[in-house]
Amino acid sequence: MKKQAFGTLTTLTLLLTVTAISVSAQSERSKITNIPFDFIVGEKTLPAGEYTVEPNRSDFDKVWLVQSRDGRTSALFTTMPVRASETQEKAKVVFHKYGDQYFLSQIWTPGDATGRELLMLRLERELAKNAVESQTIVLARGSAGRN
């Protein structure tokens, strides 16, 4: 009887540990980011607000989902891998700004030198070609910076 109870307790402990590690890793990719401006993802313009940005499926990171905190606004988008010269310390989302329009461009997760990059749409390519001024806006978890 004691052996069976010990075995059950060991199995439950192992299961809880694996679940906690999985949730921790997933939450690192999907923490809420405050985006203080309207922005374009694919064919959608999303309003300023708090968003999660995460892979649409845990086993496939080509398609990502950006979703408002309340779940009412979202967009799916396709990405491709992009590499940085060094490992990222913070989660970041990168935007290209042309005039008063912001386009989601890249997503970086901490602890990795590989991020995800969105394909540039026709509208963004046209704006980039004709823009007098453009900026890259980087929002790291909890702070904002400009390059």
Image (cartoon, rainbow, N blue to C red):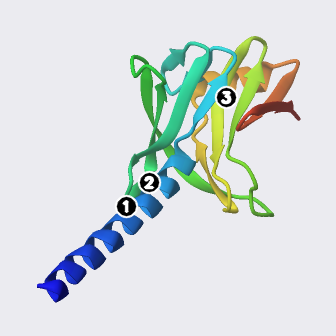
Element assignment for label 1: helix
Q: Residues within 10 Å of mark 2 (few under 14, many from 20)?
A: few
Kindly identify the amino acid type of the residue bearing the numbered disc 3: Arg
Residue 92 spot, x, y in % from top left: 69, 42
Closer to the chain start, of discs 1 and 3, is 1
Image marks 2 and 3: residues in contact by CB distance under 8 Å: no
Closer to the chain start, of discs 2 and 3, is 2
- Distance, label 2 to label 1, CA atoms, is 6 Å
Image marks 2 and 1: residues in contact by CB distance under 8 Å: yes
Instruction: Give the residue at x 71% y 31%.
Output: 95
Q: Where does label 2 land, which residue?
A: 23
Q: Where does label 1 land, which residue?
A: 19
Kindly identify the amino acid type of the residue bearing the numbered disc 1: Thr
Image-based side of 62 in relation to 35, left or right? left
Kindly identify the amino acid type of the residue bearing the numbered disc 2: Val
Element assignment for label 2: helix
- In this view, the residue in front, 28 or 15, is 15
Residue 134 spot, x, y in % from top left: 83, 24
Q: Name the outermost residue toward the front.
A: 2
Q: Where does label 3 land, which residue?
A: 125
Q: Name the outermost residue toward the left.
A: 1
